[in-house]
Image: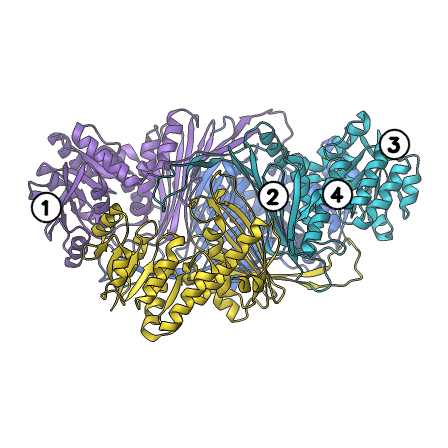
Chain colours: A cyan, B yellow, C purple, D blue
């Protein structure tokens, strides 16, 4: 059994602790949180678990094999690096760190020590994204033209990160998993309507090396919650609506064909293909459990996780470049340049 | 009675002809179209109307008081200018022309001759936009933070304009009407997935002088038709969904308030206000008829129409700047510079 | 060419006249309406057509081959019978007549003279119902268990018929077409909330000889328009939502299987099958045109139309029995008894 | 503190136990379940609680002040009566018992001993029903014309009760709370499509003494989950859609007015009022907690609960009459007669 320690028992920590205790390969050994109230809550829910106020103690404990880091973003790097140096496998909350430089260091540290470094890109493990991933792998969508996502709601305003690091991170993680093309540049714009708060609204365009595009619309100040992604392909198009309780993924057999250029100017330039729609049954297994099984499997076999440190680094590079573009009103940031600069 | 001539009886022309004949102040006098088939169709529907293949003939006819120009965009300027020079009042299809320079010339020409120059920004005359306009004027939304619109569907691919000139034009017209702030810069990105076709997908961000923002998502290659606009204000927020048959405009009494900065870091930075939603009854009068009444009223009184030539020019400036930014991968275009350059 | 006369140019007549003129096999010869205003409207829209105030004149005219009866329900019988006696083929608006007795007489009259007698059950000719019909015929749904329809909206209150004769008639026509089992009894309840008006709300249950059931919920006093039908089968289930612009017909691969009777009492009695959903592309051809082609084909070939007089009679029997049950607060009416009684 | 014992730790029991432990006025003292596995689950979740296989032991325990009965329906009567006789306050799962006779006996027993007898009609305590209840009480809907509910989904098939006792019970409880008129008769029809299972589909009409009506559509074999209730009033109409995460209750300012009887026969009989729609913000407090606070308050004050035994009895009378009508294919059952017969 892999003995797991969790650092941070705030908003997401209780959920992680529960999922650890429900994962067969895991045993929940220890929880660290600076807050006495948080430790008390943890103790009531998980009577047998060791509690500590000091994450260094958790990391130093020989009874802990793997560490899950669920603290505020700016602390990820220090804790994760210390855990790796102490020889622990590490799963970090998303985003992995708050800069490409620190993410790179974690990736190197894990590689040097042959430890598993994984990022909690939960959406990649959902039934919906698994389904879309299979569709693309099997060529059902044809060539992927675009990924266009709207991820808006009222709140939760974050203290230490802007809306890109909070919401767009989900789409970057999904895109990193689904899309085979390489992103080459990003243009982003955003605004802040609440004083002394990070940007709460942003729009991002990502350009890929094969001519495809991605677009993200993220907003903490929308009247309703929307989680809708359109994926356009040459053969089929997908609508992934995470707010639906059923039919989250709809596949449309629709598209265009170039048509007769001699047609009158007010007529269509192309002809349309309007075929069936289908909504596949989707696994309702909790994504976090699938993810923890992946973490356990990789610890046991030495395999690289689906959302490994490299993946976490690529996502942080996107977040960093997008934030920089946002300060320049959409001025495009080349990702290679960004990578070298970091 | 104002005797109206229509130039162009293609896709939209029959609708204009019908609406002219249903407008009390108007008489449909003449229709011009190069295509014999189009003239035949027009003749069958409107037996008493004079038909001609040559728009110059229509413009020269002393029996025509006002001209509606419904030809391909690149011909608007020549026809509208000739009509104004012939002393006719002019209503031009959107977009007014294909460049700010030509739009400016039309505006000046109309002013010099004290003729009405109006642009067919139909959406401004819909019950939904009238309702939102009143809400904003009465301060119901408070300070307007953002306008965020998704206008996507499958087709109609245009031959001579890209998706910005075809779809974003609607939002620019609505924004020009609703928003009091001045746009200062635009950043746009786009792509084309159909060979030998103009860009079919674009995302635009518009920056305003008061810190507010607009964002437009337009696409000819989406699996379903979406016409959804979110408008965020300090007091209330609106969702305008034009695909709904009822409840097109929903007003949400929702927003945020800055909260205690001493709260734990995983808690909210702000507090939320979640009040009622309401969907006002909306006039179902056809927008085109309201618009034609406005055209007639302005011809009779010399008043400036709600969507006059100045408004058409501002929209064309936005379209032009957005298209330029799109070729530069989102590099922001300052609108004052753009205006001077034109 | 079949020369068609239309009796009644009120609410639905203009639509019929237009569709006749768009049907290749038809020529619109004559229109009869008592109202001078209606005749004037008809004359403006159809300049070459003969107009008369007296339907008897239309029926007597040797230039008319087929008559469409679009007058108030209580006049259908007299006009249709006279038309048949004059040797004309007849298409009657739904419901065919206001009683099974008169409907029977029409059926016999048409049979005796080898004339086509058809009822305007328009929904049977829609792309959606054609699609469902094919699914059932191909066994895709398995054994059909139930047909459950909600058809409610605000208005149109009718003067001479209750809500059953106005709205349930659509479902009876669809059911008559789709379901192979024979209805054996009907139980209906209803109420009237507007003084001096026929019943405006009713709920009907129909029992079939194979144990399947139908249920109809019809209401003129609902806040929104709902047109939703659930069809349950042993292999698949269908939702037909006529208010959707796309995806009108959704097919669910869902159902139940009896499970282990030894399971604890709070557990499921059956196990569930939750498979994919699919929404086939549906023909958008106007139903009325399909229907008129069927009318023309049957006149030319002597074939029995899909919605012939027998079908119209069966529907009227259902309407009549349901109305009787409604006056008895749901007391079930046996349909054989009803048939004998008539 | 009121010491609470729970009998039955199956499907719903764990939820009740959690809610008891979250209710300040309650202490969870004891749990009884015949199943060793259920007791083990209970023990793990609630370490300090006494467990027993024998509900008689729980009832006999002087440390228990109030008993919650969450066992299969046919056992409710025996357990609840024993608990009352032992001087305990009792909360019974819905439906209270499986017959009006036994329900009556419980009501009398509780009255004789001045004990609180309450039924777990949870929906009555939801924010949505509270909101509708206030609307009706304040006259916002005017005279209530009808209550029309669709409550269908796939499963859960029950072993010992038909779909009426499982699903219609919710609507009867809500109606009993919302509607002031007295039900006088019920007509129901239903069918069973799964061998050896109770009826899985039923449609019920309820007639009230003031001419208003209710209609329930319940089904365990529907492809999707629908929880939609239309409530029609003379002043306003409501749609209550429990599947919506927000906007569960929509209020429509719509209705009809009788109009000119001299209008042409194809025109409306009435005129329509189409006003605004509004969706009030609704409390998201868990209904079970509100309900338990009500239970505690009544135990402490001797007040009658909102959903007391009388209410439970009335609901069981409806369920019983509806089931009887169902066996008679909709033959209406008079409720007074039913009451006397029982």
Indicate the position of residue B200 as horizontal and vertical percent values: 50, 45
Q: Earlier in the sequence, mark 4 or mark 2?
A: 2
User: Residue pushed farthest front?
Assistant: B341
Q: Nearer the viewer, residue D267 or B24?
A: B24
Which dot marks residue A339? 4
Residue C66 in view, yes or no:
yes
The chain under label 4 reads A
Q: Earlier in the sequence, mark 2 or mark 3?
A: 3
Which residue matches tag 3? A113
Mark-to-mark CA distance, 2 and 3:
36 Å
Indicate the position of residue D27 as horizontal and vertical percent values: 77, 50
Which residue matches tag 2? A214
Mark-to-mark CA distance, 3 and 4:
24 Å
Q: Residues within 10 Å of mark 3 (few under 14, many from 20)?
A: some
Q: In the drawing, does residue B87 fall left or right of residue D334?
A: left
Which quadrant of the view contains residue B293? bottom left
Q: Are marks 2 and 3 on the same chain?
A: yes
């Amino acid at each position: 059994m892999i003995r797991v320690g969790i650092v941070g028992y705030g908003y997401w920590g209780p959920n992680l602790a529960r999922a650890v205790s429900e994962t067969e390969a895991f045993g929940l050994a220890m929880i660290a949180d600076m807050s006495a109230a948080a430790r008390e809550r943890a103790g009531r829910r998980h009577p047998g678990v060791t509690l500590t106020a000091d994450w260094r103690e958790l990391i130093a404990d020989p009874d802990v094999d793997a560490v899950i880091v669920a603290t505020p973003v700016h602390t990820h790097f220090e804790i994760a690096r210390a855990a790796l140096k102490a020889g622990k496998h590490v799963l970090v909350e998303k985003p992995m760190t708050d800069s490409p430089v620190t993410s790179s260091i974690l990736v190197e540290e894990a590689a040097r020590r042959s430890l598993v470094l994984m990022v909690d890109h939960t959406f990649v493990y959902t039934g919906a994204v698994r389904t879309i991933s299979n569709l693309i792998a099997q060529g059902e969508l044809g060539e992927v033209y675009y990924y266009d996502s709207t991820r808006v709601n009222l709140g939760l305003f974050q203290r230490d990160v802007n809306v890109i690091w909070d919401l767009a991170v989900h789409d970057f993680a999904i895109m990193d998993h689904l899309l085979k093309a390489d992103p080459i540049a990003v243009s982003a714009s955003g605004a802040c309507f609440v004083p002394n708060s990070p940007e709460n609204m942003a729009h991002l365009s990502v350009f890929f090396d094969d001519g495809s595009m991605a677009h993200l619309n993220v907003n903490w100040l929308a009247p309703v919650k929307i989680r809708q992604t359109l994926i356009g392909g040459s053969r089929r198009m997908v609508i992934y609506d995470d707010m639906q309780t059923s039919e989250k993924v709809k596949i449309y057999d629709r598209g265009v064909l170039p048509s007769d250029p001699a047609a009158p100017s007010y007529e269509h330039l192309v002809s349309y293909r309007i075929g069936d729609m289908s909504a596949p049954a989707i696994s309702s297994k909790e994504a976090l459990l699938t993810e923890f099984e992946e973490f356990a499997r990789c610890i046991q076999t030495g395999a690289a996780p689906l959302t490994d440190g490299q993946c976490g680094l690529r996502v942080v590079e996107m977040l960093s470049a997008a934030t920089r573009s946002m300060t320049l009103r959409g001025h495009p940031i080349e990702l290679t340049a960004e990578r070298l600069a970091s």
